[in-house]
Image (cartoon, helix red, strand yellow):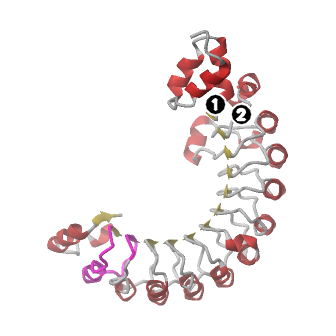
């Protein structure tokens, strides 16, 4: 085995996928350790305070993941050591997990760290900053300008993000998926940047859940996004009504749509969606209290719908659900658990024959 050169060993390691096997490979001798380090393409870090000790061993990383607290200094090490990075996943743990481990938000990285990454890792294609609450507009603007191939950007729960970031993102030619969940500073002005800029021709997935400053005007602008396949408007507030819903219904390319808890969206929107969104495969109407059986029945002859969520929709009855079952493509339906006692068992069994029935 000692006669094997680095090139031969590198070829062997390219076939070793399991991380435990790669670890065993690296423990054979110093040569094998060096080859494994040079050929490693991804790493998940649980102790970022040790980055300076081990990260220089892996100069060819394409993927870096860390959900722990990570500082600006740590990001500087990453930017300096890993210029070839394509996927940076710094998605934060859930709030519950943060509380358990005593997460210190004050010492987490901010725009200074993001600027370092933007300048050092220009090949980034996918960046996840979810719940990194110190990330702001300065860092995001710099990132989208430097990373010309950036296609996926998750800024969910980054509460400092506002329309300034969306102005820069709207100029991008590469962005395909954008998550802005919980970015409550975003307004209709920000949506205008997305809907009228270069991003309108590339965005396929857009999450705006809990952006409660949006109104019908901003939502109506989204109809200019010709490639949009997935849209999440859950909990965007009472200022989104059927006027915005009708505009959304005109986006013929939609495949997944979430209108959860839009309390001023009614059957008018549903009928329009059933008629115009012929490629729709998933629709979530949780908590849309103005919706009745008339709107649901409109999907009885839809040709593509596979998933329908009607939790907390109190104006639906068993006969309405029975009508929806005429949709031959339907695979799953979620009903409010409060309806269970009012729908006869025989009807429940009949529903289960055609698709999976869930209660929520």
Q: Is residue 319 above or below residue 101?
A: below
Circle 2 sits in a helix, a strand or a loop, which is it?
loop
Q: Nearer the viewer, residue 138 or 314?
A: 138
Instruction: Please state, as top left, top right, bottom left or bottom right, where the C terminus lies in the image.
Output: bottom left
Q: Are marks 2 and 1 in contact (CB under 8 Å)?
A: yes
Residue 27 position by quadrant: top right
Residue 77 position by quadrant: top right
**Alpha carbon separation for disc pair 2 and 1:** 7 Å
The disc at residue 60 is: 2
Q: Position of residue 328 (x, y in %)?
A: 29, 76
For the point 44% across and 80% down, the residue is: 289
Residues rendered magenta in the picture: 304-331
Would you say residue 154 sits in the magenta stretch? no
Q: Is residue 155 above or below residue 101?
A: below
Q: Which residue is mark 1?
A: 40
Residue 6 position by quadrant: top right
Instruction: Please state, as top left, top right, bottom left or bottom right, where the N terminus lies in the image.
Output: top right
Q: Is residue 236 left or right of residue 288?
A: right
First-in-chain label (2 vs 1):
1
Circle 1 sits in a helix, a strand or a loop, which is it?
loop
Q: Is residue 338 left or right of residue 125?
A: left
For the point 25% across and 83% down, the residue is: 319
């Amino acid at each position: 085995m000692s006669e094997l050169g680095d090139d031969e060993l590198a070829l062997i390691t390219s076939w070793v996928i399991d991380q435990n096997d790669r670890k065993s490979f690296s423990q054979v001798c110093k040569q094998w350790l060096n080859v494994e380090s040079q050929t490693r393409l991804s790493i998940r870090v649980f102790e970022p305070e040790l980055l300076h000790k081990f990260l220089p061993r892996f100069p060819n990383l394409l993927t870096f993941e860390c959900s722990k607290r990570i500082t600006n200094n740590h990001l500087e090490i990453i930017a300096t050591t890993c210029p070839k990075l394509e996927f940076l996943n710094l998605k934060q743990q859930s709030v519950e997990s943060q509380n358990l481990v005593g997460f210190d938000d004050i010492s987490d990285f901010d725009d200074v760290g993001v600027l370092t990454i933007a300048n050092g890792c220009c090949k980034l294609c996918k960046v996840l900053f979810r719940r990194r609450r110190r990330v702001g507009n300065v860092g995001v603007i710099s990132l989208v300008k430097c990373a010309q191939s950036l296609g996926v950007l998750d800024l969910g729960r980054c509460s400092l993000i506002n329309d300034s970031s969306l102005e820069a993102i709207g100029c991008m030619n590469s962005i395909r998926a954008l998550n802005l969940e919980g970015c409550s500073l975003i307004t209709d002005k920000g949506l205008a940047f997305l809907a009228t800029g270069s991003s309108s021709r590339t965005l396929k997935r857009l999450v705006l859940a809990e952006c409660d400053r949006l109104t019908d005007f901003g939502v109506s602008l989204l109809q200019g996004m010709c490639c949009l396949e997935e849209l999440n408007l859950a909990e965007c507030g009472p200022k989104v009504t059927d006027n915005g819903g009708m505009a959304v219904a005109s986006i013929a390319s939609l495949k997944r749509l979430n209108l959860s808890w839009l309390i001023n969206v009614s059957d008018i929107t549903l009928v329009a969606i059933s008629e115009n969104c012929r490629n729709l495969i998933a629709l979530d109407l949780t908590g849309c209290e103005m919706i009745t059986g008339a709107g649901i029945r409109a999907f009885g002859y839809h040709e593509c719908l596979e998933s329908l969520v009607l939790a907390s929709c109190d104006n639906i009855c068993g006969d309405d659900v029975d009508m929806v079952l005429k949709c031959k493509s339907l695979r799953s339906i979620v009903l409010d658990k409060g309806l269970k006692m009012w729908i006869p068992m025989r009807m429940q069994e009949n529903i289960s024959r055609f698709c999976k029935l869930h209660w929520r």
